[in-house]
Image (cartoon, grey):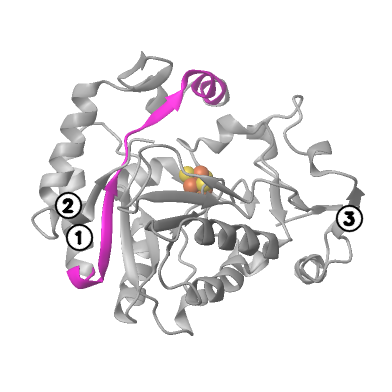
Amino acid sequence: MIETIYIEKKIKDHPRTISILSKFKKARHIEIDKYGEVFNKHNQNFRIQKNNPALILAYKKEGYVLPAPEGFGIGSSKNYYFSHMYNCIYDCRYCFLQGMYSSANYVVFVNFEDFDDEIKKIIQKHPEDSLTFFSGYDCDSLALEKVTGFAKHIIPFFQKHPNVDVEFRTKSIQIEPFSLIKPMDNLVIAYSLMPDLISKSLDNKTPSILKRINAMSVLASKGWKIGLRFDPLIHGKDWKDLYTKMIIMVFNSIPVSSIHSVSFGPLRFPKQMFKDIFKLYPNEPLFLGPLLQNKGIISYSNEIEQEMTFFCKELTAKYINESQIFKCSA
Ligand code: SF4
């Protein structure tokens, strides 16, 4: 429940601001000049703030669309991401956002049209390239959709640009933006997945794996393309058995023809980010596991990473073409 909403003065009369405020009738409103006044200040504690985050409605001035990190992609020659929001209503223990921001407040940028303009410019600049745009890098792309309406806004843009792909990456079971329109060949709804037992201990506040699979199954039955994102791969006791059961369950629930792509991503943190996250959760078994530091990155050893990726890839390749399987190293 949102109790406090900070509103940048510049967008206090924006129709989207008014619409979002109408969804939180009891919240107190505080006007601010810039969202940085209440977000990412050094004296905040992510863990404490996560118990009762505020919503910040803001105007994004720049950086609407950015190149995706090297190694992030599902087959296009150029990859970009955009984030209409910073932070997330979920609380996954491995989430890099908790190390990136010291504030757990949610920032929602209301000037969606500027994202459209920037994406359009990139499309015009790269007529010869295959492009994929990823929604939900600094947030979950759909988890707060009922409040923001961002997917509903941006989907028609991509309907007009069928030659470029867009991915909505999520752990939510929010299917509304897709349920009333015709499926699009250039749109992938990608679900982050891990074995249920591991998810129960790490994916705090998210819908269960079973619910995510059900949402995927409904969307697939309506003709939408589904992405499977086994990212991050989590090591632990019986991991082979757990991943095998989960992968079999997913492929038994979703027709192979509905699967756009599968990707595997390792668990990795930049050193300073890991230190910050570790300070928040010093007793978390995930961070006490077999992690090493290599060139400023904290991760499992190469052997563990490779063994996990190879094992899961082999299993997945029994169901789909290898050309649909990607390793995400970002
Ligand atoms: S769903 Fe994604 S963005 Fe949200 S807390 Fe989990 S890892 Fe972070």
In the picture, measured across the screen, residue 253 lies left or right of residue 181, that is: left
Residue 237 or residue 61, whichever sits in front? 61
Residue 186 or residue 38, whichever sits in front? 186
Residue 249 numbered mark, or none? 1
Above or below 310: residue 168: below
| Labels 1 & 2 near each other (Cβ < 8 A) | yes
Residue under the image location 26 percent in, 54 percent down: 262
Secondary structure found at label 1: helix
Residue 188 inside the magenta-drawn segment: no
- Residue farthest along the left direction in this orientation: 318
Residue kind at label 2, given as amino acid type = Lys
Residue 10 numbered mark, or none? 3
Question: Upstream in the sequence, badge 2 or badge 3?
Answer: 3
Residue 111 horizontal/vertical position (percent):
73, 61
- Could you classify mark 2 by the number of other residues whose Cα lies within 10 Å: few (under 14), some (14-19), or many (20 or more)? few
Residue 277 inside the magenta-drawn segment: yes
Residue 259 or residue 122, whichever sits in front? 122
- The magenta-colored residue range is 254-278
Quadrant position of the N terminus in the picture: bottom right
Question: Upstream in the sequence, badge 1 or badge 3?
Answer: 3
Quadrant position of the C terminus in the picture: top left
Secondary structure found at label 2: helix
Residue 64 horizontal/vertical position (percent):
63, 51
Residue under the image location 20 percent in, 44 percent down: 242
Task: Compute the Cα span from label 1 to label 3.
Answer: 49 Å
Task: Compute the Cα span from label 2 to label 3.
Answer: 51 Å
Disc nearest the viewer among 2 and 3: 3
Quadrant in the rendering for residue 26: bottom right
| Residue at the spot of label 2 | 245
- Could you classify mark 1 by the number of other residues whose Cα lies within 10 Å: few (under 14), some (14-19), or many (20 or more)? few
In the picture, measured across the screen, residue 243 lies left or right of residue 328, that is: left
Above or below 179: residue 284: above
